[in-house]
Image (cartoon, grey):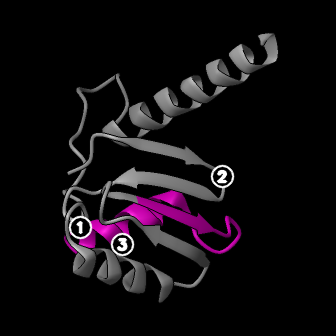
């Protein structure tokens, strides 16, 4: 399961609990994702549990990347939010977009 996600077109940073404290799992996730067409770079940090994924949006989508991670058992299937509120991934992505916009505005003021 993950409780942290930061996503932009072509870049995803996600915390995967199984990676934290496990160099072997970090290597497995990296190798697994790099075998997928469109994924250009993966950096799985076994100290923090963060996995940074750089990808070509013309070849692979964010949803496909999450499905790959779920199918391999690195992420649990995303829980659904009650009808009318969108699904869990959409809510997390919306929050990430808002946080990025807020950070940009703060930096512009400094």
Q: Is residue 87 left or right of residue 98?
A: left
How far across and down, in percent of the image, does residue 110 sit?
Answer: 77, 13
| Left or right: where 70 falls relative to 39 | left
3 and 1 marks in contact (CB < 8 Å): no
Circle 3 is placed at which residue position? 68
Q: Residues within 10 Å of mark 3 (few under 14, many from 20)?
A: some
Residue at x 57%, y 23% (from the top left corner): 98
Q: CA distance from mark 2 to mark 1?
A: 22 Å
Residue 42: % across, % down: 51, 72
Q: What residue is shown at x 34% (from left), y 37% (from top)?
A: 87
| Residue picked out by circle 2 | 9
Q: At x 25% / y 65%, what residue is drawn?
A: 19
* Label 1 neighbour load within 10 Å: few <14, some 14-19, many 20+: many
The image shows residue 102 at horizontal and vertical percentages of 63, 18
Q: Position of residue 23 (x, y in %)?
A: 26, 76
Residue 56 part of the magenta segment: yes
Is residue 85 in the magenta section?
no
Residue wearing tag 1: 74
Which is nearer the N-term, disc 3 or disc 1?
A: 3
User: Earlier along the polypeptide chain: callout 3 or callout 2?
Assistant: 2
Task: Please identify, in this view, whether the residue under mark 3 or under mark 1 is nearer the observer.
Answer: 1
Q: Specify few, some or many for label 2: CA neighbours under 10 Å numbering under 14, 14-19, or 20 or more.
A: few
Residue at far front of view = 47
Label 3–label 2 contact, CB within 8 A: no
Give 102 or 89, whichever is nearer the viewer. 102
Q: Quadrant of residue 26?
A: bottom left
Magenta span covers which residues?
Answer: 51-73
Mark 3 to mark 1 CA distance (whole Å)? 9 Å
């Amino acid at each position: 399961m993950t409780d942290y996600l930061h996503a932009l077109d072509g870049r995803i940073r996600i915390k995967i609990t199984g990676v934290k404290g496990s160099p072997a799992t970090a290597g497995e996730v990296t190798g697994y994702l790099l075998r997928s067409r469109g994924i250009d770079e993966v950096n799985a940090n076994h100290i923090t549990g963060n996995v940074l994924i750089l990808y070509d949006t013309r070849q692979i989508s964010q949803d496909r990347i999450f499905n790959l991670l779920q199918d391999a058992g690195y992420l649990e299937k995303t829980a659904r939010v009650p009808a009318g509120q969108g699904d869990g991934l959409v809510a997390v992505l919306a929050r990430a977009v808002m946080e990025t916009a807020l950070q940009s505005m703060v930096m512009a003021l400094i």
